[in-house]
Image: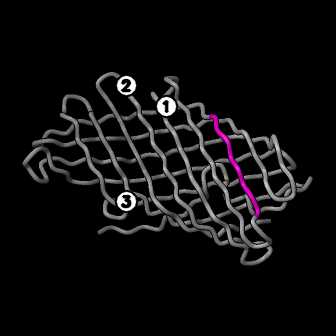
Amino acid sequence: MKYAVLVTLTSLATLSSGAVWADDWEFVIAPYLWGPDFRTSLDIGPNPPVDGSKSIFDILNSAFLIAGEARNGRWTIGAEFNYLNLGDTVSIGPFSNAASWELDGIMTSLAGSYAVAEDSQSRIEVLGGLRHWDLDLSTTVAGFTASTDQSWTDPIIGARYSRALNERWKLAAMGNIGGFGYGSKFQWEALVQANWSWTETIDVAAGYRHLSVDFEDGRNVVDLILTGPYVALAFKF
């Protein structure tokens, strides 16, 4: 089993639901550990499709994921940068370990959101932005390797809701969709999260995140799904 530290912030800064809503700029930095199942279906060049489904910790070579946000009043700007290097051997029909796949690439996003409704306890935001993918992919079947380098940018739209249950506990949910044939055929993301205020500047958070993308370019078809729990420390300043 291969190990790496996943250091990142939540997509579009959902962890920032713990920040105080004021007229001054507020920032959130939230490193977290994400342990999703990684499901992939790759149809690259002349090779037959290669499918796999495993915990990311079983196929992880290296990773670096980081994001952040800035908020002023009703407006929020969020960005993230994710890097993953993954690989696995898989079965084809009755033949075990007959094929393998590798993925090395980045995902970056930049989005803005606006609070269409808010009070002392809750906040509803609409968001829009761009998510860019740059993936170096390869499959090997019966000793023959096919590879491709794919890069595309998806427009995304979505919404986010956060609510303070009391002085220390908060809940948040976020969803977005994108692609629409401009980059990928379709992508979607959803997460739910609970925040506990440890101190005035640090929250402990836990949640569940799902991210899926379906991309096609000629003979190359890339379907990726990451879904699983995460824990985080959110630093507010």
Q: In this view of the protein, which residue sits in the foreground, 38 or 132?
A: 38
Q: Mark 1 or mark 2, which is nearer the start of the sequence?
A: 1
Marks 3 and 1, how far apart in space? Answer: 23 Å
- 162 in magenta: yes
Q: What residue sits 74% from the left and 45% below the top?
A: 77
Q: Amino acid at mark 3?
A: Ile
**Which residue carries the number 1 mark?**
152
Q: Amino acid at mark 2?
A: Asp
Residue 56 in the image: above or below residue 212: below
Q: Amino acid at mark 1?
A: Trp
Q: Secondary structure at mark 2?
A: strand
Q: What residue sits 52% from the left and 25% below the top?
A: 180
Residue 157 in the image: above or below residue 218: below
Q: Residue furthest front?
A: 165
Q: Which of pointers 3 and 1 indicates the residue nearer the eye?
A: 3
**Which residue carries the number 2 mark?**
217
**Which residue carries the number 3 mark?**
56
